[in-house]
Image: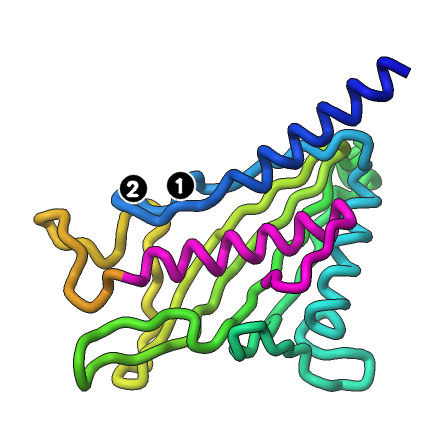
Amino acid sequence: MKKIILLVLIFAYTFSYAQDTKFVYGEGGLVPRHFVIDLEGMNKDDLFTKAEEWFEKKYYGRGGHDKKGNDGDKKTEKGRTTTILSYEVVKDEPEATGKTDKNIKLRFIGFTDNALCFGTDDNYTCVGLEYKVELRFRDGDYRFKPMRLSFKTSSSKKEQNINLNKHKFKGKDGVIQQGYEEVSSQVETLLNDMNKSILNHLTGKEQEDEW
């Protein structure tokens, strides 16, 4: 009985810690660059299956389309549309390596419109944010790793990457460019809400107001 109580307390602590851990986009870029969250008692196959359920629930099917060919979009609570542009599962092949695969990786590229708003006066605009994220599942944990963030403005067709190693919108004097003061919190909110939504589904803790 004591062992059961101890395990419950450990899991509760781990889950609570994971919920309180958040990405911050500042002078050093995105910190941390990824999260590894312990989920004791859950194997990689179960975690991967639940992650696929999350995609089915949020986007009506992989690759941005459901089985009927409908776009895999969903309206968020804030009225924005989010779309999965691509979806890839990466597994080690035992036949090729001679070893049993220890992890499963799921990489996806998504797009959320009106995710970033910046500028001043007549130049104020809101643009969509495209992101590439990798989820890695192992027995007892999963990793959430943003790999790329980018956007385009109406005045330029060139894609602009958001530097994950240093703040994109800070000048050499260390001051954020005028009109871009809110971009950091917007990037943080999107990534943290997404990670929270996935974690809630993996652990069976759904919330109405989540991403």
Residue of label 2: 28
Residue at (71, 55) in percent of width and height: 89
Q: Is residue 177 magenta?
A: no
Q: Is residue 189 magenta?
A: yes
Expressed as whole percent of the image width and height from the top left, the position of residue 161 reads 35, 62
| Residue extending furthest toward the top | 2
Per the rendered image, the range of residues in magenta is 182-211
Expressed as whole percent of the image width and height from the top left, the position of residue 173 reads 8, 48
- Callout 1–callout 2 Cβ contact below 8 Å: yes
Dividing the picture into quadrants, the one containing residue 66 is bottom right
Residue at (35, 49) in percent of width and height: 25
| Residue extending furthest toward the left | 173
Residue at (35, 78) in percent of width and height: 126
Residue at (42, 60) in percent of width and height: 149
**Three-letter amino acid code at the position of disc 1:** Val
Quick one: label 1, few (<14), some, or many (20+) residues within 10 Å? some
Quick one: label 2, few (<14), some, or many (20+) residues within 10 Å? some
